[in-house]
Image (spheres, rainbow, N blue to C red):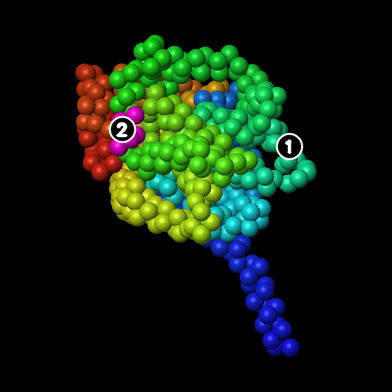
């Protein structure tokens, strides 16, 4: 009897062990996200772009507005934020929805960031579990879950409310489907067997998240067998993209002008020369990426050499009938196109989709390799997984960089808190002026930024914000004026004449930026400007401006 029960418990343990192991990485991602979030502090202190933009667009959407921010486009995240904000407010009765969000934006963003963390963990777990259940290969499933740890710049996005952390579960599930398709492990019937439709939904959704997904549109083309399927896929993808980016229903012309500017201009955000491509800048960006992302380029090189080897006559027969070489070719093409696209307008975060595909690309390389090797060497598959995980773990740009980055992040947060404490002990000013690059010790800056970047934001939120934060102004460098909550400009002279004592809170990148801002007031004969506080660690200054 005792022996029978023991066997029963052992069998139960072994049945649950794979699921428990597949929970390790998702739980680690949640813990990592909370660690980063606590080290950085409230969003208004850490980053307002694009967090406050998406928050405002999400709120506007729940108010019935379709004229939303579409630059990324980022529509699915805006929908998510709008729904989450409404649910949060349901448990916070006492004042109207818009007022509560505007008064407590950091609270709403924090809860939304937790929702994103849970989404990331669920997506990574589900992708690993699907691969394990359909293939029976637990080490492979665990290896694929390790994809977000390929670089610190990938998993550090877990603290943000932006598209990049959402790419983590998205690419995990996307590759899981590609893999099962290549291994002929998809369900024999039902929705997920309708490959063209599923691929179109996935790619349409990916494109609606952010435009740097464009290179990965080619992946299904390498898996679909006939031109009819490929043509149907292209048409359906366009349709689903338009559906998932539904603000285009009212913003098609604006969207077209934005895309045209991105393509025709060599600078970021549709700026720069009207020459499509600045060759010297393009080559410089490529060189930068090759030096900073050696692991990515080494993976692409290894995959290319392995693909070429698989077509050699002595080895070709061993992969006959397999679609693994097609998937490998598609992933290599997508990676190369992505790198070329990012080189036009380079930023480290733009490479995150390409970095998320590094581990899946290595996985396919290993699968192709073990098919090319003699049978007795195929058990080396698991050793290769372990070796790659080890190399990623000790790479300077992964956990080592995170360990260096985290104390600095905490130190920066403490410096910002010190600045807040100083500001709070000052007498209440007649007016507050804000000038910033991306964050401020006052939440008004993030609110200004989100309102201005949301189409029609002034009409929707200006009155509420003016009531909550009266006599607050945002400095716009390119105009040299200060703007109120109705986005009306006010020259510095008018500010000085209207308010006897004004506080200017500013954080800038360089001393030259501070000097230019100081010059706006020092040029006024009836203004007296005094530097009250400076924190060099976070490049922040607080000035008192008095009327003589």
**Mark 1 vs mark 2, CA separation in Å:** 42 Å
Q: Residue furthest bottom?
A: 1
Residue for badge 1? 194
Q: Residue 146: x percent and y percent?
A: 49, 52
What is the secondary structure assignment of the residue under circle 1? loop
Looking at the image, which is closer to me, 284 or 406? 284
Rendered location of residue 219, percent (x, y): 57, 33
Task: Say few, some or many: other residues with alpha carbon within 10 Å of mark 2 (under 14 / 14 to 19 / 20 or more).
Answer: few
Magenta-colored span = 286-291
Q: Looking at the image, is mark 1 or mark 2 nearer the viewer?
A: 1
- For the view shown, which residue lies furthest in the top direction? 274
Residue under pointer 2: 288
Q: Using the rendered image of the protein, determine whether residue 205 is visible from the camera's viewpoint.
A: no
Residue 133, compared with residue 15, is above or below; it is above
Residue 201 lies in the magenta stretch: no
Point out the tag, 1 or 2, that comes first from the N-terminus.
Answer: 1
Q: Position of residue 438 (x, y in %)?
A: 38, 34
Q: Residue at x 73, y 46 (%)?
A: 187
Q: Specify the principal SS of the magenta part.
A: helix
- From what the image shows, is residue 364 above or below residue 340? below
Q: Residue at x 36, y 25 (%)?
A: 475
Label annotation for residue 410: none
Q: Residue sitting at 22 percent across and 35 percent down?
A: 531
């Amino acid at each position: 009897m005792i022996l029978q029960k023991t066997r029963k418990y052992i069998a139960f343990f072994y049945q649950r062990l794979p699921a428990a192991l597949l929970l390790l990485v998702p739980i680690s991602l949640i813990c990592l996200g909370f660690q980063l979030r606590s080290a950085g502090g409230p969003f208004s202190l850490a980053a307002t772009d694009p967090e406050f933009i998406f928050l405002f667009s999400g709120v506007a959407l729940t108010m019935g507005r379709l004229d939303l921010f579409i630059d990324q486009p980022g529509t699915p995240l805006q929908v998510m934020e709008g729904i989450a904000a409404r649910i949060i407010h349901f448990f916070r009765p006492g004042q109207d929805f818009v007022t509560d969000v505007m008064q407590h934006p950091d609270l709403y963003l924090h809860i939304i960031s937790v929702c994103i963390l849970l989404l990331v963990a669920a997506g990574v777990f589900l992708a690993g579990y699907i691969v394990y259940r359909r293939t029976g290969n637990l080490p492979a499933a665990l290896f694929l879950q390790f994809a977000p740890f390929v670089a610190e710049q990938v998993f550090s996005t877990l603290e943000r409310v932006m598209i990049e952390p959402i790419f983590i579960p998205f690419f995990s599930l996307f590759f899981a489907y590609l893999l099962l398709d290549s291994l002929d492990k998809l369900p024999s019937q039902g929705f997920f067997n309708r490959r063209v439709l599923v691929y179109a939904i996935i790619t349409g959704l990916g494109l609606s998240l952010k435009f740097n997904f464009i290179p990965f549109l080619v992946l299904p083309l390498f898996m679909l067998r006939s031109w009819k399927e490929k043509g149907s896929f292209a048409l359906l993808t366009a349709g689903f993209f338009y559906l998932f980016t539904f603000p285009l229903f009212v913003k098609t012309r604006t969207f077209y002008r934005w895309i045209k500017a991105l393509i025709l201009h060599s600078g970021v955000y549709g700026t720069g020369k009207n020459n499509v491509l600045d060759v010297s800048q393009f080559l410089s960006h490529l060189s930068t990426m090759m030096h900073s992302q050696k692991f990515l380029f080494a993976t692409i090189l290894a995959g290319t050499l392995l693909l070429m080897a698989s077509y050699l006559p002595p080895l070709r027969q061993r992969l006959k009938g397999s679609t693994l070489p097609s998937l490998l070719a598609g992933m290599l093409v997508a990676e190369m196109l992505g790198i070329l696209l990012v080189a036009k307008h380079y930023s480290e975060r733009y490479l995150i989709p390409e970095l998320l595909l590094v581990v899946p690309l290595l996985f396919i390389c290993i699968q192709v390799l073990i098919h090319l090797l003699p049978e007795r060497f195929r058990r080396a598959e698991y050793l290769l997984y372990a070796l790659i995980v080890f190399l990623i773990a000790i790479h300077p740009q992964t956990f080592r960089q995170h360990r260096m980055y985290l104390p600095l992040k905490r130190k920066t947060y403490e410096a910002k808190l010190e600045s807040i404490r100083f500001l709070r002990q000052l007498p209440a000013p007649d007016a507050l002026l804000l000038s910033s690059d991306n964050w401020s010790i006052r939440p008004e800056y993030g609110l200004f930024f989100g309102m201005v970047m949301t189409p029609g934001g002034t009409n929707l939120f200006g009155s509420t914000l003016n009531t909550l934060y009266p006599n607050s102004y945002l400095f716009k460098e390119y105009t040299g004026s200060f703007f109120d909550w109705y986005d009306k400009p006010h020259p510095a002279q008018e500010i000085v004449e209207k308010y006897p004592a004004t506080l200017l809170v500013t954080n800038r990148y360089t001393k030259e930026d501070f000097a230019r801002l100081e010059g706006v007031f020092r040029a006024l004969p009836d203004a007296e400007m005094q530097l009250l506080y400076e924190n060099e660690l976070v490049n922040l200054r607080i000035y008192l401006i008095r009327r003589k």
